[in-house]
Image: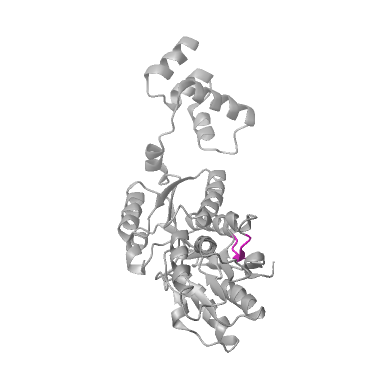
């Protein structure tokens, strides 16, 4: 038998029947183990898994999908994988999907509508079971027609699409920016700049709306010259703060669209010999890991990033199991984290 197993493992495309024969059990039992069926005893499961490894068996999900209609694969597309925000979100998504026997396939769209379109089409061509998507900038409901045409289970994260009948999980951007802006106002600041967030997305519009709402609630006039668009990168933040601090009447505080922008702002202030929290108060949103470093100590609105990922994955699995569920929208509440960059940490 050992010689037969060796031959199978080295030279042939191993089949379920080969594993069953090698163990002296039924092909149906082997199939149950491969598909994680709970009816199989743990002893039998371990025995089968050990033999599949010895023989070099690789599960053909494509063939299995033809009979079951399911591939157990999930598409996961975000616009900027270099942002630590999405590292945490995607990690939580992967964890939940893995625990439920699903395999995520990841795409970094780089804000490209064309790349996003091609990824969705490829996912459908390969019989993907579902999609978790952070839409690229300027995505409209029309851009997602393949999703609706094929009834592909889809959950949007971080960025919603107006009027799209799709599940969504994200943070309350309006509340997040009201929190950080009102904190600055409570410290006596009235000339407050806003850096970043010019993209055509719901995340951008809602965060800016929170900033505007806080100013209006405290009768502080909006100075359009203090609202500066830039890329959501440290480089974008550094360039923007260099421009603002050249004004004849610069702001006393700045709200950054995201922590990545704020890191650039802090770097720019350092190069100009300004002290954050003393010469200029700086607040932001997200609370990525870098924000709490001793040399940064950034005041920010903490977003429940892992919770967004976990909820999104769970919602997608529910949507796959029951496509008739009505669309659900979840907004998670942010938390103000006060540190030194606003001078009160």
Residue at the spot 54% in from the left edge and 56% down from the top edge: 309
Residue at the spot 43% in from the left edge and 53% down from the top edge: 130
Q: In the rendered image of this protein, does residue 324 appear above or below residue 52?
A: below
The extreme bottom residue here reads: 219
For the image shown, how many numbered marks are present on the structure? 0
Task: Evaluate whether residue 75 shows in this view.
Answer: yes
Residue at the spot 66% in from the left edge and 65% down from the top edge: 340
The extreme right residue here reads: 345
Residue 298: say if magenta: yes
Residue 6 located left or right of residue 334: left
Residue 124, image x and y in percent? 35, 51
Residue at the spot 42% in from the left edge and 73% down from the top edge: 163
Residue 175, image x and y in percent? 58, 74
Residue 27 or residue 100, whichever sits in front: 100
The extreme front residue here reads: 273
Within the image, what quadrant is residue 80 found in? bottom left
**Quadrant that contains the C terminus:** bottom right
Residue 296: say if magenta: no
Task: Evaluate whether residue 1 shows in this view.
Answer: no
Residue 163 located left or right of residue 305: left
Residue 289, image x and y in percent? 59, 54
Residue 258 or residue 225, whichever sits in front: 225
Residue 34, image x and y in percent? 51, 34
Q: Magenta span covers which residues?
A: 297-304
Residue 135 located left or right of residue 221: left
């Amino acid at each position: 038998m050992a010689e037969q197993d060796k031959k199978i493992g080295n030279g042939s495309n191993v089949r379920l029947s080969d594993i069953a024969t090698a163990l002296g059990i039924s092909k149906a039992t082997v199939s149950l183990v491969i598909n994680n069926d709970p009816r199989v005893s743990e002893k039998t499961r371990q025995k089968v898994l050990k033999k599949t490894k010895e023989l070099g068996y690789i599960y053909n999900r494509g063939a299995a999908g033809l009979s079951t209609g399911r591939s157990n694969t999930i598409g996961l597309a975000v616009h900027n994988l270099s942002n630590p925000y999405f590292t945490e979100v995607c990690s939580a998504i992967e964890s939940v999907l893995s625990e439920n026997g699903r395999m995520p396939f990841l795409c970094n769209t780089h804000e490209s509508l064309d790349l996003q379109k091609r990824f969705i089409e490829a996912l459908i061509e390969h019989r993907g079971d579902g999609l978790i998507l952070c839409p690229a900038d300027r995505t409209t409901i029309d851009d997602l027609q393949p999703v609706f045409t094929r009834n592909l289970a889809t959950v949007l994260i971080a960025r919603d699409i107006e009027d799209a009948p799709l599940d969504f999980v994200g943070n309350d951007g309006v509340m997040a920016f009201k929190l950080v802006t009102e904190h600055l106002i409570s410290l006596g600041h009235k000339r407050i700049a806003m850096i970043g967030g010019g993209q055509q997305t719901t995340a951008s519009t809602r965060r800016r709306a929170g900033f505007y709402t806080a100013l209006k609630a405290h009768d502080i006039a909006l100075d359009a010259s203090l609202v500066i668009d830039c890329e959501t990168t440290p480089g974008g933040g550094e360039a923007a703060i260099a421009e603002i601090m050249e004004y004849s009447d610069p702001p006393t505080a700045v709200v950054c669209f995201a922590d990545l922008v704020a890191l650039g702002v802090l770097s720019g202030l350092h190069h100009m010999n300004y002290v954050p929290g003393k010469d200029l108060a700086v607040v932001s949103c997200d609370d990525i890991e870098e924000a709490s470093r001793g040399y940064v100590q950034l005041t920010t609105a903490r977003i429940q990033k892992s919770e967004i990922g976990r909820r999104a994955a769970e919602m997608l699995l529910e949507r796959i199991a029951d496509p008739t569920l009505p669309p659900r929208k979840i907004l998670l509440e942010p938390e103000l984290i006060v540190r030194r960059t606003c001078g009160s940490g």
